[in-house]
Image (cartoon, grey):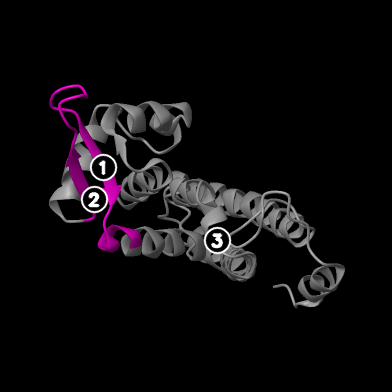
Amino acid sequence: MSTTRLLLLGIVRIFQPAYGYQLRRELLTWNVQEWANINPGSIYTGLRTLAKHDFLQEIEEGPHHRPGRTSYKLTPEGEAEFFSLLRQHLWTVDGFHPDRMQAALSFLWTLQRDEVLTALEARIAQLDAQLKAVPFNEREILADSGTPNQVVEMLRIGASRNRGELEWTREFRERIVGGAYSFAGEPPDWYPDPTLLTHWRDRPTP
C-alpha cells in the first residue's frame, strides 16, 4: 500500500494539476501493474482516497472542460508524505518488497545527490550485514532435522537476491559518484566539479 501511495503522490507531483485518466495512462507506461502489483482500475480509487485524507486537493474543472472531470494536486500534507515515503523506501532494505526500491528510483531526482549517496551507503551496509548473517542462520537451520527443505531454499534464494542487489547498489553508487544523472538543485546537463568527485570517492564505503 505504501508503494502505491508513493507512486500516486509522485506522479501527481510531476504533472499537477492532472486528471485521473492522464495519471493512470502515465503510470501504465511505467508498467506498474507488473512490478508494483497495482490494479489499473484501483488508481482512481487510490487518488480519491488520498484526497479524502487531505494529501491531494480535488479540483473540479470549469464549464469549458469535460463535465465531471476532476484534477488533482498535492496539498502541503501530500508533499510532506511524498518525501517521507520516498526516504523510507530509499533508506530501508526490504527483501520481501523489492518494489519499494523500484518506486523510489522513479523519484530519486527530487532529492539532492549527497542524500542519495548517503542512503545508498546505508543500503550497502544493511545488505552486507544480512549476507554475513546467512551462513550462521543456514547452519542452524540445517542442524535441525525437522526443518522443511523449502525453508532452507527460501533462505538461499533470499541470500542470492541480496547478493544481486548489493552488487547493483555498489555499481549504482559509483555511477552517481561519477556524475551520472541530475538531482535536486542541479541542471539537467549538470556535471560535477572534479573536487566534488574526489570528495565522494574518498568517502568510506561499507
> On the rendered structure, is 106 left or right of 25?
right
Helix, strand or loop at label 3? It is: helix
Task: Say if mark 1 contacts mark 2, CB within 8 Å.
Answer: yes
Q: Which residue is mark 2?
A: 56
What's the distance in space between the residues labelled 2 and 3, CA to CA? 47 Å
Residue 72: in magenta span: yes
User: Which disc is residue 149 wearing?
Assistant: none
Residue at image point 44% right, 51% down? 100
Q: Earlier in the sequence, mark 1 or mark 2?
A: 2
Please name whichever residue, 25 or 150, is drawn nearer the observer in this view of the structure.
25
Q: Residue 159: which quarter of the image?
A: bottom right
What's the amino acid at mark 2?
Answer: Leu
In front: mark 3 or mark 1? 1
What's the distance in space between the residues labelled 1 and 2, CA to CA? 6 Å
What's the amino acid at mark 1?
Answer: Tyr
Residue 120: in magenta span: no
Dot 2 alpha-carbon crowd within 10 angstroms: few under 14, some 14 to 19, many 20 or more = many
User: Where residue 112 appears, x then y in whole percent?
Assistant: 59, 65
Asked if 86 appears above or below 46 in the picture, the reply is below
> On the rendered structure, is 154 left or right of 121?
left
Helix, strand or loop at label 1? It is: strand
Quadrant showing the C terminus:
bottom right
Q: Which residue is mark 3?
A: 138
User: Where residue 98 appears, x then y in whole percent?
Assistant: 48, 48
What's the distance in space between the residues labelled 3 and 1, CA to CA? 50 Å
Task: Say if mark 2 contacts mark 3, CB within 8 Å.
Answer: no
User: Start and end of the magenta stretch?
Assistant: 55-79
Please name whichever residue, 200 or 93, is drawn nearer the observer in this view of the structure.
200
Q: Earlier in the sequence, mark 3 or mark 1?
A: 1
Asked if 55 appears above or below 123 in the picture, the reply is above
User: Which disc is residue 72 wearing?
Assistant: 1
